[in-house]
Image (tube, helix red, strand yellow):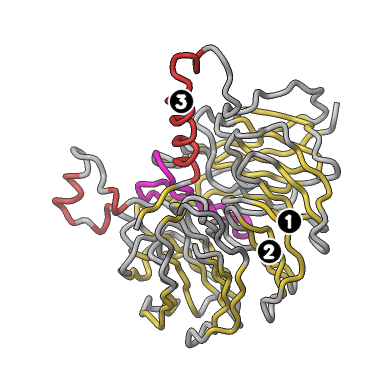
């Protein structure tokens, strides 16, 4: 099975453009270049509250090491398995734990100083902090549950498949998805496998999987064939199934409709986006569509009180009515700049582009109010917020807290 990432697709497009245009590529534009940033009057100041280094940060490639915010603590992990707990108000480190080296034995521990780390042991999907547990998983399919108090390992379970997103839990069941199309449910106390569901992926998919939503009554999971499904957490029985997008086109590339972004749930509604498909809202209990709009995204969505914000694959940042799906505004001044998923804080929405520029726009109209460069290497990971403070984890491993200051 062939798999690619959205960023790999972008590279393919640019290489093809170079090949077709020859040397003239250097002297004239082809229309595939990232849009140049526009100047604007900055009306918002961003206050950098604190900054903390988290090991080696993201690895090169497709990893998206999402941190987790739980109460007054942020938990972050680097690709080598260093888990760090940080106070979200001050940035003070509370504890740290290396979850991989401790399990390698003496020879493995010594070997790690002289050779590159085993890519199969790398963490690529971030960390979850829910119901008293910290959950991480390795690329090789090993799921680990840690104590939130000090990072001590509670259990670990080897699964047959690569895991590139954070597992999730309701306190009784841990659910995780593998890139070969399987959804696994584990006992949250022991790691014992309870059940699994197999949804074989198409020939060509994006490199990655969403994290499922796990509640007391259902596990909601999106798959690379464009289907969203709900399962009984206790036994894996299918509660409902809904196709969000149908493949179109002749080539496998054109027919990709992955649910790559993790779905969102609020009250009785599930919000989900697909690549080359639809942005949709579903009734939580039945999976029935409430609204849908054509669109393409591979990044996580964001919600405010009445708006849904989406970073489209072409670089548009779009706001929809969370109730009706009506398009409220579209910012098209960052086209082809590889935006990460948006995040809401205060009255604003933030996105980071591939060059590491964080763009802040008004929730009301999508107009720019501020811009700051957070990391020259970018920030692939979804950002976090507690409502007023924005937390950004950069590719080079800097966890930074920002707050909006009074306008100029």
- Give the secondary structure at mark 2: strand
**Residue holding disc 1:** 303
Disc on the earlier residue, 1 or 3 = 3
Q: Confirm or deny contact between disc 2 and disc 1 (CB under 8 A).
A: yes
Residue bearing mark 2: 271
**Image position, residue 323 (x, y; %):** 82, 64
Q: Which residue is mark 3?
A: 20
Sequence-first tag of 2 and 1: 2
Q: Measured from the top left, where is residue 375 in percent x and y? A: 54, 30
Tell me how far mark 1 sits from mark 3, CA to CA: 41 Å
Q: Is residue 263 magenta?
A: no
Measure the alpha-carbon separation of dots 3 and 2: 40 Å
Lower sequence index among marks 3 and 2: 3
Classed neighbour count for the residue bearing mark 2: other residues with Cα under 10 Å, few (<14), some (14–19), many (≥20): many
Q: Which percent across, then down, holds residue 33?
A: 57, 26
**In the image, which residues are magenta?**
60-82
User: What residue lies at 46% left-to-right and 25% top-to-bottom?
Assistant: 20
- For marks 3 and 2, give the one nearer the viewer: 3
Q: Is residue 274 left or right of residue 208?
A: right
Inter-mark Cα distance, 2 to 1: 9 Å
**Percent x, y of residue 88:** 61, 48
- In the picture as drawn, the residue positioned furthest to the left comes out as 107
């Amino acid at each position: 099975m062939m798999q690619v990432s959205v960023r790999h697709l972008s590279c393919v497009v640019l290489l093809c453009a170079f090949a077709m245009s020859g040397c003239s590529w250097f002297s004239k534009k082809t229309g595939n270049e990232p849009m140049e940033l526009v100047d604007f009057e900055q009306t918002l100041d961003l206050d950098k509250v604190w900054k903390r280094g988290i090991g080696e940060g993201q690895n090169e490639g497709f990893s998206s090491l999402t941190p987790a915010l739980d109460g007054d603590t942020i938990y972050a992990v680097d690709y080598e398995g260093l888990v760090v707990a940080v106070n979200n108000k001050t940035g003070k480190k509370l504890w740290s734990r290396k979850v991989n080296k401790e399990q390698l034995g003496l020879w493995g521990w010594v070997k790690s100083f002289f050779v590159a780390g085993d890519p199969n042991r790398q963490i690529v999907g971030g960390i979850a902090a829910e119901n008293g547990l910290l959950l991480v998983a390795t690329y090789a399919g090993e799921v680990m549950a840690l104590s939130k108090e000090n990072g001590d390992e509670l259990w670990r379970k080897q699964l047959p498949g690569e895991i590139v997103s954070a597992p999730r839990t309701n306190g009784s069941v841990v659910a995780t998805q593998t890139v070969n199309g399987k959804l696994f449910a584990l006992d949250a106390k022991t790691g014992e496998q309870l059940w699994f569901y197999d949804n074989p992926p198409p020939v060509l998919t994006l490199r990655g999987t969403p994290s499922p939503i796990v509640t007391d009554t259902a596990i909601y999971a999106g798959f690379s064939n464009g289907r969203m499904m709900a399962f009984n957490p206790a036994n894996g029985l299918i509660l409902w199934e809904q196709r969000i997008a149908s493949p179109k086109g002749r080539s496998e590339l054109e027919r990709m409709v992955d649910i790559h972004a993790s779905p969102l749930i609020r009250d009785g509604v599930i919000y989900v986006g697909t690549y080359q498909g639809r942005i949709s809202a579903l009734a939580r209990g039945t999976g029935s569509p409430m609204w849908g709009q054509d669109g393409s995204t591979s990044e996580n969505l964001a919600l405010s009180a009445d708006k849904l914000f989406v970073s489209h694959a072409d670089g548009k940042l779009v706001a929809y009515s969370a109730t009706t799906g009506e398009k409220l505004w579209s910012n098209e001044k960052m086209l082809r700049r590889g935006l990460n998923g948006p995040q809401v804080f205060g009255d604003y929405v933030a996105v980071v582009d591939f060059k590491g520029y964080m763009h802040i726009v008004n929730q009301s109209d999508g107009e720019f109010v501020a811009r700051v460069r957070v990391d020259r290497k970018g920030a692939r990971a979804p950002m976090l917020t507690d409502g007023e403070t924005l937390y950004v984890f950069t590719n080079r491993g800097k966890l930074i807290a920002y707050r909006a200051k009074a306008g100029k």
